[in-house]
Image: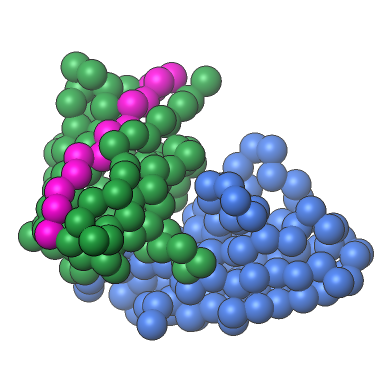
Chain colours: A green, B blue
Amino acid sequence: EVQLVESGGGLVPPGGSLRLSCAASGFTVSSTTMSWVRQAPGKGLEWVSVIYRDDKTYTADSVKGRFSISRDNSKNTLYLQVNSLRPEDTAVYYCASGPWAARIDYWGQGTLVTVSS
Amino acid sequence: QSVLTQPPSASGTPGQRVTISCSGSSSNIGSNNANWYQQLPGTAPKLLIYSNSQRPSGVPDRFSGSKSGTSASLAISGLQSEDEADYYCAAWDDSLTVVVFGGGTKLTVL
């Protein structure tokens, strides 16, 4: 059974950093496309970043230069390093997987990041 | 302002057929597949339709998708109370090199 379990969210002051993790089971993260999608409270879905099987990555302009996606194949885990956080980055961050970036077959339960002083 | 445009709300009565539109451009829906997601209150999104009109296993055939030019549509027939949710379209955008989502449509079953 495919499972994605996020962790690492929390309350952080503006300008702070976090590393979000997504532990995968039931498949290997290196064998498919892995993404992060976020959802601000009461708002719609916003795509954040993707890493393909060939290690190519793409990132939304709104977070480019501040957020970085990566994976550790030995731990079967996806990461999102989030730096220079702003209040508008407050959201539930979902880990996601699928054959390509816009088709997400599996979603994690999400981890909440709150940016506030 | 979302790159893909969806109506913010839609409604119908049980048993009715409802359609939700998703309008894009030549760089996203016009040249790539549209996908649809259902998000029930308080839960993670779920893939409903992929590649414009394909249903993952387990999705009832009451849900169908189509694409024409730079627009896509999601149709729900035989509306049920459990269909009350937010629905999002998504596609890859070749110009922006990002995934673009619609702003979401809140479906109310009256």
Q: Which stretch is magenta?
A: A15-27
Tell me: A117 left or right of A99.
left
Tell me: residue B51, above or below residue B110.
above
Residue B54 visible, this angle: no
The percent coordinates of residue A100 (x first, y second) are 35, 47
Tell me: B6 left or right of A8.
right
Query: Quadrant location of residue B58?
Result: top right
Tell me: residue B80, above or below residue B11.
above
Residue A88 visible, this angle: yes
Tell me: B21 left or right of B18.
left
Q: Is residue A25 located in the magenta-colored stretch of the structure?
A: yes
The percent coordinates of residue A57 (x first, y second) are 16, 49
Decide whether the magenta segment is chiefly helix, strand or loop: strand
The percent coordinates of residue A68 (x first, y second) are 14, 48
Residue that appears at 48% across and 25% down:
A2
Residue that appears at 37% across and 78% down:
B3
Query: Quadrant location of residue A74?
Result: top left
Q: Quadrant of the C terminus of chain A?
A: bottom left
Q: Residue furthest top?
A: A74
Q: Residue furthest right?
A: B15
Residue that appears at 64% across and 53% down:
B40
Residue that appears at 40% across and 52% down:
A92
Q: How many marks on residues?
A: 0
Tell me: B63 left or right of A4.
right
Q: Is residue A116 located in the magenta-colored stretch of the structure?
A: no
Query: Quadrant location of residue B105?
Result: bottom right
Tell me: residue B108, above or below residue A24.
below
Q: Who is closer to the viewer here, A52 or A2?
A: A2
Tell me: residue A26, above or below residue B14.
above
Q: Residue furthest left?
A: A65
